């Protein structure tokens, strides 16, 4: 199998059939072995019935039905786990992504990239509750992560199999796929893709998504920069706080013992105690983090590096 198209669908009964036909129309002339993996994310309408019917006629269509609605990220993860292709393309099931862009994505991937992300430069969504929050989120993500893209929210992406299989997605992290892949050493590129208005059904998200994106950003930033060395985040704060507290306490002790001043009612005393406690807490938090990092990596044999290739010689005498 050369290519898998992974599509998460949730209540898209009217959109999914035309989309699958469109994908067929685009990919059939390319003469490559491909499959479509539609993940029904616990739809409550007739989406699954439509998929089941299509599956009987379409030899390229695989359908994975989740037991309940797990969310777009989980649906994508399910599709990624199922996909057989050497190259995996992700796209929305509502028809807003244009299958006609797939050949260009594949070509860009062949230029030596591991992941090509779509950029919806003509985004067809309402401004106030969609494009504006997404503009802010894009700036934030671009600032906080090492991957500079224009559009992180675009589902349409193509990636190589090893990248796709190495992804661990939690929460609503599908928009951080390029950032996560980059941390694992992937070569990332961006390509302008078409975006179309939603023709049927309604969007599954509201404005509150922006808040969750910001929280996820925090997690991704922390994990990508510090997951193997948490003590380096908490340690310095703890050290500075603890040392400051210690110096203040020393100063008060000198005042008490040498100058015989009353220090019992000094706010500085409280502050120094507070700083010393905070210092201890941060340092122990860092150490606990270090233990967790070891449990995380060693319990699942997940090394802290990713090997690109190995040139091994037989070795001489
Ligand atoms: N989706 C999903 N599970 C969910 C919510 C959404 O699989 O819980 C799918 C949905 O069917 C669509 C894609 O994710 O194919 C993107 O959703 P939507 O179009 O509502 O998002 P928007 O384009 O408004 O950002
Ligand atoms: Mg959409």
Image (cartoon, rainbow, N blue to C red):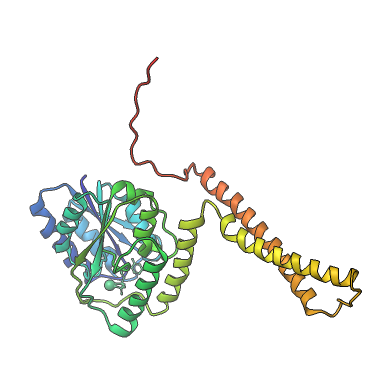
Front one among 296 and 222: 222
Q: Quadrant of ligand 2?
A: bottom left
Residue 226: x %, y % from top left:
51, 56
In the shown orientation, is residue 68 left or right of residue 301? left
Position of residue 265 relative to residue 64, above or below, is: below
In the shown orientation, is residue 145 left or right of residue 201? right
Q: Quadrant of the N terminus?
A: top left
Position of residue 288 relative to residue 206, above or below, is: above
Image quadrant in which you'd find residue 205: bottom left
Q: Quadrant of the C terminus?
A: top left
Front one among 243 and 36: 243
Residue 27: x %, y % from top left:
13, 55
In the shown orientation, is residue 72 left or right of residue 198? right
Residue at the front extreme, as displayed: 259
Residue at the bottom extreme, as displayed: 128
Residue at image coords 73%, 65%: 276
Res 66 seen here? no
Residue 303: x %, y % from top left:
47, 43
Front one among 135 and 209: 135
Front one among 49 and 72: 72
């Amino acid at each position: 199998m050369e290519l898998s198209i992974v599509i998460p669908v949730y209540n898209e009964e009217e959109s999914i059939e035309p989309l699958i036909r469109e994908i067929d129309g685009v990919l059939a002339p390319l003469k490559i072995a491909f499959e479509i993996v539609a993940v029904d994310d616990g739809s409550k309408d007739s989406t699954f019935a439509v998929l089941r019917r299509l599956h009987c006629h379409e030899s390229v269509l695989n359908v994975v039905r989740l037991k309940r609605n797990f969310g777009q990220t989980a649906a994508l993860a399910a599709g990624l786990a199922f996909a057989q292709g050497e190259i995996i393309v992700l796209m929305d099931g509502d028809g807003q992504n244009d299958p006609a862009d797939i050949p260009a994505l594949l070509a860009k991937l062949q230029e030596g990239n591991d992941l090509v992300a779509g950029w919806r430069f003509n985004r067809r969504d309402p401004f106030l509750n969609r494009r504006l929050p997404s503009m802010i989120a894009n700036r934030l993500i671009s600032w906080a992560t090492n991957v500079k893209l224009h559009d992180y929210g675009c589902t349409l992406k193509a990636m190589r199999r090893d990248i796709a299989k190495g992804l661990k997605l939690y929460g609503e992290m599908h928009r951080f796929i390029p950032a996560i892949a980059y941390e694992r050493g992937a070569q990332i590129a961006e390509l302008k893709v078409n975006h179309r208005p939603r023709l049927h059904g309604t969007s599954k998200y509201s404005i509150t998504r922006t808040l969750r994106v910001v929280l996820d950003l925090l997690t991704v930033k922390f994990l990508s920069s510090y997951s193997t060395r948490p003590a380096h985040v908490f340690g310095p704060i703890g050290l500075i706080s603890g040392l400051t507290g210690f110096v203040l306490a020393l100063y008060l002790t000198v005042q008490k013992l040498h100058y015989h001043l009353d220090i019992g009612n000094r706010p500085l005393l409280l502050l120094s105690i507070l700083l010393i406690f905070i210092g201890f807490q941060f340092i122990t938090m860092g150490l606990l983090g270090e233990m967790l990092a070891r449990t995380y990596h060693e319990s699942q044999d997940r090394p802290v590096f990713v090997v690109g290739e190995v040139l091994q010689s037989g070795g001489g005498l």
